[in-house]
Amino acid sequence: MKKTFAPVAALLISVSILLTGQGLQGTLLPVRATLENFPTLAIGAMGAAYFVGFTLGCLKGGELVRRVGHVRVFLAMSAVASASPLVHALFVNPLAWSLLRFVTGFCFAVLYVVIESWLNDRSSNETRGIIFSTYAMITLTVLAIGQMLTLLFDPADFQLFIIASVLVSIRALPVALSTSPTPEQPHKGSIDIPRLFKVSPSGSLGCLVSGLANGAFWAMAPVFTSSVSSGTSLAAWFMTSAVVGGAVSQWPVGLLSDRVSRRAVLVSITVGGCAVGIAISYLAPDLTFVRANLLAALWGAMAFPLYTISVAYANDRAEAHEYVTVSSGLLLMYGIGAILGPFIASVLITFRSPGELFLFSALTHALLAIYVLSRWIRRVQGSPDHPIAFSDALAATQTVSHIYEEETLQENPGQKG
């Protein structure tokens, strides 16, 4: 276990500091926007602006890494991202905040490209699930800590913006001072979407659905909680409960995905996310403080592992030289979903009810489960006892190009494509 994590220890420490600041911003900005009486659609637009920048960062991140390397890109994006919270405190209006969220989204997307390609470079098919689950567990734990920091000061003041800036700034130190070897600069940095879907359509769509549901959650959950309880405390506790639930489930889910079919784990958590989303939506008018937080924890336990399992599922089938481009592509799929998610959720909330946020989440999870199950069934039916198309026959053999290995490699996790 020590050998597994030693090459990425400094990176994981940096991630923990970085996302403490990100968690603080993620809760602080919607809460402050509500206090400033920003329109609901404007709050949704802010969330979408973050992911528009995130999408652009996904498109450009691989090229930046190709040009100057992982460490320099990491340090540069850290500097820009640390300035953003301070400017938020200076200009409190929807347009300025949307522009700033765009810049922040760009920086964080590039940082995630660096982080996730680095983790993939230092993992194998036998360890990828546990490494990415540990990464996600750390991510969600510190996000929860960051969200609880909103209780330290009044969100209407400037202190919390300063704390967020400091946290984002100092996270660069562990990586800058680390002696661990860094990944080689890739020869190719541009995203190839057709290739991404040939590598793993289920993993790609899993990241898209994760973006739809989670993007809507981060942007609109404080609006949902304001309909359940007055004040800002429930928003912090509700989002923290969801994050804690996701953090607790990451390790067993990731470990299980290394031991059994990742596809089966993917289906299980999407079905679970659908069920909990329906429950929250149905019970929204009668939620108590305790019930709201318990359901939030259950939702997080199902919804948040979806991205990491989808990423591990896709990268099991990628070549080593593709890690940067595959990571960029999967983040792009997440970003596209997260652009659409806040807009769709804000429209549903505006014209129907706040509980529609989680009904939307349930629907996206249900559609993904149906898709993955349908592919699974087709693979089972595509045995020698059933006539199948030649292209499907190719997909069933382990001797053809890695392009067709999405389903068969899972039963041979030690085999690289």
Image (tube, rainbow, N blue to C red):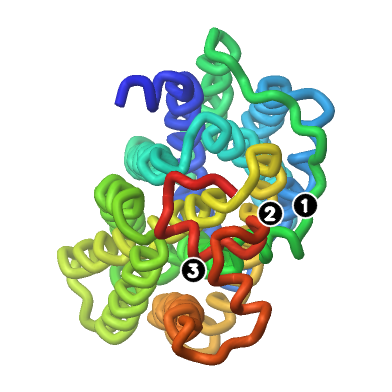
Asked which secondary structure carries label 3, the reply is helix
Q: Where is residue 394 in the image (x, y as percent from the top left)?
A: 63, 71
Using the image, determine if residue 85 lies above or below residue 311.
above
Circle number at residue 329: 2
Q: Which of marks 3 and 2 is in front?
A: 2
Name the amino acid type tagged 1. Ile
Q: Return the disc, 3 or 1, that comes first in the chain's sequence.
A: 1
Residue that mark 3 sits on = 213
Callout 3 touching callout 1 (CB < 8 Å)? no
Figure quadrant of residue 404: bottom right
Number of the label disc, if any, that sits on residue 191: 1
Count of all numbered marks drawn on residues in the image: 3
Three-letter code for the amino acid on which mark 3 is drawn:
Ala
Q: Earlier in the sequence, mark 2 or mark 1?
A: 1
- How crowded pointer 3 is (Cα within 10 Å; few <14, some 14-19, many 20+) is rated as many
| 377, 119: nearer the viewer | 377
Image spot of residue 133 (x, y percent): 37, 44
Answer with left or right where residue 328 lies relative to residue 44: right
- Earlier residue among tags 3 and 2: 3
Question: Residue at 49% across / 47% down in the picture?
Answer: 415
